[in-house]
Amino acid sequence: MSCKYDFKSDLKTAILDEAFHLGIKISSSKSLYDILIDYLTIYHKLIPSKPRDVFVCPQLKADLSTHPKAKEIRTIIEIAKRGGNLNPFQSKRLLQTNFHDHMITEWNIYHFHLSLEQDKKTKFVKQVNSLLFAYIDNNSIAFLGVETHKDGIFGDTKWWTLLHDNFPQLIEKYKNDARDVYPPLSASDRQQLWDKGYTTLMVKVKDCVYYSPNIGRTTSGHNMVVIRQAMSILDWIDSISEQLDKYYDAVCNALKVESAVAQYKVIIYGEDLILAEMSSLQQVLKFNEVFDLSKLR
């Protein structure tokens, strides 16, 4: 059976459509790999809106009664408790494909601008010098403290110290057997290394050494997770294309779709990348799934 599908073209179209919807500028003249890298770079900086366990450092909680930005801090914490959208409080450079947030890439630590006034030209709040820092993973968010936007603050291990002292259960899995990290780095040293594309890999807090939660970045500044995921997606497309080429009729029979009218397409569906059969509106595979050949023979 002669079958027509172009999953790489499907993926390129899907990413560009999704980018346009999100207000992300990605050139359609780029290669699929570069488009995928640009999209995933931004995707991994976005905070998914979902319920998480919310923690607040005791000192931050104690300071709220007199803090000049108490209203803004409480607003952000309440949004987190509801599982709401925290992204408008991030840097308005978030949607720039060449902007790499080193604290997110290395430590899963985000910063929020303490303003409730919307920026006139974007969907973000007005960018201010007062920042709220928080550690975020899939299940938890820990608000650590407030600092002003100044040199070195984004590479300061004080944020890890606050996690270590107050919420050790959140970072216990990153603890390793090393006794020290060499050479010792100041906050400014670490920030300069990050700015040049280097990964510091580990951080020492008091008598403990932790791996960075993320695996760092390439010298181009891209998150290593982004590079690996992009390669995995392209490998997956090659794999399902090869399988479908070989077992096209068998797949159609399993789906109860006539081979002559079947329309296979790779699409972004919600948060998932899937292979769909469009004539019957069936979801066939999710990213990283392949056809079970034992059921096709």
Image: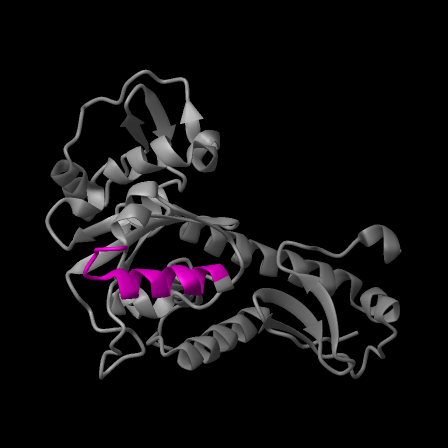
The residue at the point 48 percent across, 59 percent down is 81
Q: Can residue 97 be seen in this view?
A: no
- Measured as percent of width and height from the top left, residue 69 is found at 22, 62
- Measured as percent of width and height from the top left, residue 207 is found at 31, 19
Q: Quadrant of residue 248 in the image?
A: bottom right
The residue at the point 37 percent across, 29 percent down is 210
Classify residue 44 as left or right of residue 111. Answer: right
Q: Is residue 201 magenta?
A: no
Residue stretch rendered in magenta on the structure: 65-81
- Measured as percent of width and height from the top left, residue 234 is found at 53, 58
Is 51 located above or below residue 164 in the figure?
below
State which quarter of the image contains the C terminus.
Answer: bottom right
Count up the numbered dots. Answer: 0
Q: Quadrant of residue 282 in the image?
A: bottom right
Most foreground residue, 174 or 55 = 55
Classify residue 45 as left or right of residue 14. Answer: left
Most foreground residue, 20 or 148 = 148
Q: Does the magenta stretch include residue 79?
A: yes
